[in-house]
Image: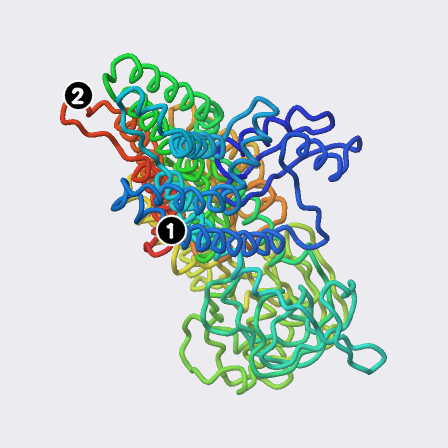
């Protein structure tokens, strides 16, 4: 495809092909996304396009790899054509500019022009003919008509100068105009191809994270195989410095892994047996043996690459208008050129034909559908790539275009504002705990203070095992909060003991026997139902913790409450700052949560959110999005769970946290690979910059044609005698496309 009109033609042809349900052409990447049914095959799609002079490349390689190879090949071809045409055009230009009256110079110019136009520039004529056969026109049509007419007119004047001499007119030749147009447009195409390849550098970087081979462990032996050959369940050896080839679980060994491509965090993460690892991350010093859980297209990295590809190929709403304009652009320009020629022939006076020809050729050459076609997709490609480099995965261009318009954002609490991982943040023992059967080993903690997160080394009575019993009970509990208690106590060096019995009590907690005595862990209802005494200081502390959004867990024996633990889903360090940035930019921030009102209020106050709702169910979230939309708000929804998916689907802009559920990420149009909420204002800033780039590109593309075409037609001639030379028109046309692509590439260097 050589211009936006080509892209429009390909899209139209495919959409009207039997068996095709949808087709979307990306002119910037020379790719098309097609949705078709069983009636068609890729070969059938290719045949439909070949009928009108196009075709698709059918390859076993990945699309992006094929595109890169074709872009490199195309660039080298255009470069060779440009250099060859330039070398032959230079003497033609010198002869035309400085030796225009030298008779032999005309014949030399014609001889040199033939290979420039019909060898190095033959693709213009071949493509134009293919289009004409099907009553279509594109940029090649404009170039072929303008250069062909200029050459034929010059050749006629070279062979038959006496025709004009008989009419008292000195015949002019325009070989230099025809050849320079080919050189300038080829040079512009060369720069355009080079610049277009740079718009996909972010995707190339992501693809570069995928290793080509891996070391397979089989029957105790190792062998190197291609990444395509790995199977689920394979055992893989990861050596120091190697990239992880698949998503999997560490079976043996320990090491530190650089996961910055996923989390954005520069500090390597320790991995040991049982930990998950992801494709594309980099092993540091130790060796690991991992079990493949996800391979090929199922890995997290492959999903990211696929989504970036789809997003770069998607169309922003404004592009639909541009496509319509591009589809009729070339026929309109040809019409303007014919009108220009006719007006000059009627009003041009003595040199009417010569001026009419030059003006018509200039109109054909200066009109640039390429700039229009490249304006939106190049900016979108760079924007999506910039997002991927900053852990912001954008799935479609519409979200990128809408992001900067968002004026209301809804945040889920758990896993979005908070970390989504409950941890023990407070621990208080009863002052009377020494009277109970409580034993606290010295290894448990060195602090003698009764403060948060301290396990006291009190003087225990003989035979007590309090902390160990607490750990043993929680180890057997299936409650989500029990895991936080177990993790906390094990980190303190506590060891569990063998319980004589264990029982889980629904909606209350657990109980168990040790050395003939019963112990309880659970909520306050469990204690009251069993007639357990609660010391005043623990009751007061529990109330204080509840007001701070902590969930209180009680530990007691048959008679007395021994301790309380405060568990909290801690707020992410970046949440407060991110919310402040959103509010300062004029975005109203709302928090919705299924948690209780007390916890919701405490979290909202801590992060500075004024509008919040507690105890909401999934449909409530979706209804709340609708209510804001009915007020005229452009709403963004941020969530990470299955319960958020309905609201994510309803929102204008949907954002999923990368560590969340697959359903949330499937529904959302933007995924934050990291859990850092500051990426949200960055995403909106990226949207603003990208849309500005699109607007600038479209402005210059339109204004260029609006100003350039009338000047080429000769509107200034009656005023100041200026008539645009076709050579200058060709140069302007070539560089208009390049300027649009270069403007898009500026975004790569801007801070978001």
Number of other residues with Cα within 10 Å of mark 1, as a class: few under 14, some 14 to 19, many 20 or more: many
Disc 1 + disc 2, Cβ < 8 Å: no
Disc 1 is placed on an element classified as: helix
Residue to which mark 1 is pinned: 745
The Cα–Cα distance between marks 1 and 2, rounded to whole angstroms, is: 40 Å
Find the residue positioned furthest to the right. Answer: 219
The way the protein has been coloured in the rendering is: rainbow
Disc 2 is placed on an element classified as: helix
Q: Is residue 227 left or right of residue 552?
A: right
Q: Residue at x 54, y 56 (%)?
A: 72
Q: Quadrant of residue 481?
A: bottom right
Q: Quadrant of residue 582?
A: top left
Q: Residue at x 55, y 24 (%)?
A: 136
Instruction: Choose between 422 and 381: the one closer to the eye.
Output: 381
Could you say which disc has been placed on residue 718 in the image? 2
* Placement of the N terminus among the 4 image quadrants: top right
Could you say which disc has been placed on residue 93 in the image? none
Instruction: Choose between 102 and 347: the one closer to the eye.
Output: 102
Q: Position of residue 339 (x, y in %)?
A: 36, 16
Q: Nearer the viewer, mark 1 or mark 2?
A: 2
Q: Position of residue 31 (x, y in %)?
A: 58, 43
Find the residue positioned furthest to the left. Answer: 720
Q: Is residue 287 above or below residue 513?
A: below
**Is residue 121 visible in the rendered structure shown here?**
yes
**Is residue 407 visible in the rendered structure shown here?**
no
Q: Position of residue 27 (x, y in %)?
A: 51, 39
**Which circle's residue, 1 or 2, is located before the other in the chain?**
2
Instruction: Choose between 727 and 635: the one closer to the eye.
Output: 727
């Amino acid at each position: 495809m050589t211009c936006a009109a080509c892209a429009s033609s390909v899209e139209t042809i495919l959409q009207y092909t039997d068996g095709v349900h949808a087709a979307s052409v990306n002119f910037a990447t020379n790719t098309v996304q097609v949705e078709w049914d069983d009636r068609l095959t890729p070969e059938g799609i290719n045949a439909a396009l070949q009928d009108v002079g196009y075709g698709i490349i059918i390859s076993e390689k990945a699309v992006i790899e094929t595109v890169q190879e074709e872009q490199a090949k195309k660039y080298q071809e255009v470069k060779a054509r440009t250099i060859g045409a330039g070398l032959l055009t230079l003497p033609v230009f010198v002869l035309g500019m400085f030796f225009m009256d030298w008779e032999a110079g005309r014949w030399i110019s014609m001889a040199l022009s033939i290979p420039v136009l019909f060898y190095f520039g033959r693709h213009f004529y071949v493509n134009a003919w293919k289009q004409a056969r099907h009553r279509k026109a594109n940029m090649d049509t404009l170039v072929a008509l303008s250069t062909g007419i200029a050459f034929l007119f010059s050749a006629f004047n070279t062979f038959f100068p006496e025709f004009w001499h008989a009419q008292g007119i000195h015949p002019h030749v325009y070989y230099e105009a025809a050849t320079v147009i080919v050189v300038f447009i080829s040079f512009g195409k060369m720069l355009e191809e080079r610049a277009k390849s740079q718009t996909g550098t972010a995707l190339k970087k992501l693809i570069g994270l995928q290793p080509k081979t891996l070391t397979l462990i089989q029957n105790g032996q190792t062998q190197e195989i291609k990444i395509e050959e790995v199977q689920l369940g394979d055992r893989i050896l990861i050596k120091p410095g190697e990239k992880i080839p698949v998503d999997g679980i560490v079976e043996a060994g320990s090491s530190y892994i650089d996961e910055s491509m996923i989390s954005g965090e520069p500090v390597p993460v320790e991995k040991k047996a049982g930990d998950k690892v992801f494709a594309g991350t980099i092993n540091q010093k130790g060796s690991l043996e991992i079990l493949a859980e996800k391979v090929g297209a199922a890995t997290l990295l492959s999903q990211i690459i696929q989504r970036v590809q789809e997003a770069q190929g998607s169309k922003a709403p404004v592009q639909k208008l541009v496509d319509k304009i591009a589809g009729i652009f070339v026929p309109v320009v040809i019409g303007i050129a014919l009108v220009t020629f006719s007006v000059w022939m009627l009003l041009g006076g003595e040199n009417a034909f010569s001026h009419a020809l030059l003006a018509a050729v200039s109109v054909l050459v200066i009109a640039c559908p390429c700039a229009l076609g490249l304006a939106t997709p190049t900016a979108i490609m760079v924007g999506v790539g910039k997002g991927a480099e900053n852990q912001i995965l954008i799935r479609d261009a519409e979200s990128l275009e809408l992001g900067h318009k968002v004026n209301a954002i809804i945040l889920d609490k758990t896993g979005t504002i908070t970390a989504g991982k409950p941890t023990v943040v407070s621990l208080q023992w009863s002052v009377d705990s020494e009277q109970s059967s409580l034993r606290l080993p010295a290894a448990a903690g060195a602090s003698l203070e009764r403060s948060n997160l301290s396990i006291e080394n009190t003087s225990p009575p003989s035979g007590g095992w309090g902390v160990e019993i607490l750990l043993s009970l929680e180890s057997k509990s299936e409650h989500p909060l029990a895991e936080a208690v177990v993790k906390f106590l094990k980190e303190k060096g506590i060891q569990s003991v063998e319980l004589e019995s264990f029982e889980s009590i629904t909606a209350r907690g657990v109980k168990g026997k040790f050395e003939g005595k019963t112990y309880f862990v659970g909520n306050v209802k469990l204690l009251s139902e069993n007639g357990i005494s609660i010391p005043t200081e623990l009751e007061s502390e529990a109330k204080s913790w509840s007001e701070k959004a902590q969930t209180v867990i009680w530990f007691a024996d048959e008679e007395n409450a021994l301790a309380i633990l405060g568990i909290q889903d801690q707020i992410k360090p970046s949440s407060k700052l991110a919310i402040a940035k959103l509010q300062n930019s004029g975005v109203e921030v709302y928090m919705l949560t299924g948690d209780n009102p007390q916890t919701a209020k405490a979290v909202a106050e801590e992060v500075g959110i004024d509008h919040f709702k507690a105890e909401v169910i999934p449909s409530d979230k979706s209804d709340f999005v609708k209510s804001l939309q009915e007020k005229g708000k452009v709403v963004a929804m941020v969530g990470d769970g299955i319960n958020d998916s309905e609201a994510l689907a309803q929102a204008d802009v949907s954002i999923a946290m990368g560590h969340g559920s697959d359903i949330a990420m499937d529904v959302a149009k933007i995924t934050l690979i990291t859990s850092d909420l500051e990426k949200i204002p960055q995403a909106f800033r990226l949207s603003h910059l990208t849309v500005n780039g699109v607007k600038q590109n479209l402005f210059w593309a339109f204004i260029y044609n609006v100003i350039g075409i009338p000047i080429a037609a000769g509107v200034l001639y009656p005023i100041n005698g200026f008539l645009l030379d076709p050579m200058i028109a060709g140069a302007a046309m070539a560089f208009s496309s390049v300027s649009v692509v270069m403007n898009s590439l500026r975004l790569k260097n801007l801070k978001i």
